[in-house]
Amino acid sequence: MAGKARLICASAALAEGGAGVRFEREGARGPESAFVVRFDGTAHAYLNRCAHVPVELDWQPGNFFDADGLYLMCATHGATYDAATGRCAGGPCRGQGLIKVAVTERDGGIYLED
């Protein structure tokens, strides 16, 4: 079903700098955990995998932002990432960023693009 968009969540489910929505996508080696958050008015999605050590970022399901809602943060190692680009912003990620996942927002929903 290549080329088909899949609904992840309603647009209203994402608050600016708030909880994200976890979802799975099909990767080269099988299902991969991913998430979508809203930052600066835009939906941004990434694989749920710290660039430092491949563990999931959220300390509780959907909690990806730091306390100020400005950076995505690995709960295990404290690596921080720019929410709009996924680039390393500090900590043990040492310049390695998150892997972006293509999503679009339209008609009141957030869609995963193949």
Image (tube, helix red, strand yellow):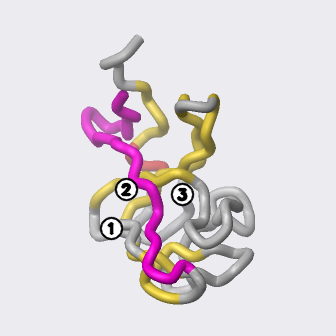
Residue at image point 36% right, 16% down: 2
Expressed as whole percent of the image width and height from the top left, the position of residue 105 reads 29, 42
Mark 1: amino acid: Ala
Work out which quarter of the rendered image holds the C terminus and state it: top left
The quadrant in which residue 44 appears is bottom left
Q: Residue at x 74, y 75 (%)?
A: 76
The numbered mark, 1 or 2, whose residue comes first in the sequence reads: 2
Disc 3/disc 2 C-alpha distance (Å): 10 Å
Q: Which residue is mark 3?
A: 20
Quarter of the figure that contains the N terminus = top left
Name the residue carrying label 1.
84
Which quadrant holds residue 48? Answer: bottom right
Secondary structure under the numbered disc 1 in the rendered image: loop
On the image, the x and y values in percent for residue 24 come to 59, 36
Apparent side of residue 12 relative to residue 75 in the rendered image (left or right): left
Side of 52 where 69 appears, left or right:
left
Q: How would you rate the neighbour count of disc 2 (Cα within 10 Å): few for under 14, some for 14-19, many for 20 or more?
A: many
Mark 1 and mark 2 residues within 8 Å of each other at the beta carbon:
yes
Segment tinted magenta in the rendering: 93-114
Q: Earlier in the sequence, mark 3 or mark 1?
A: 3
| Secondary structure beneath label 3 | loop
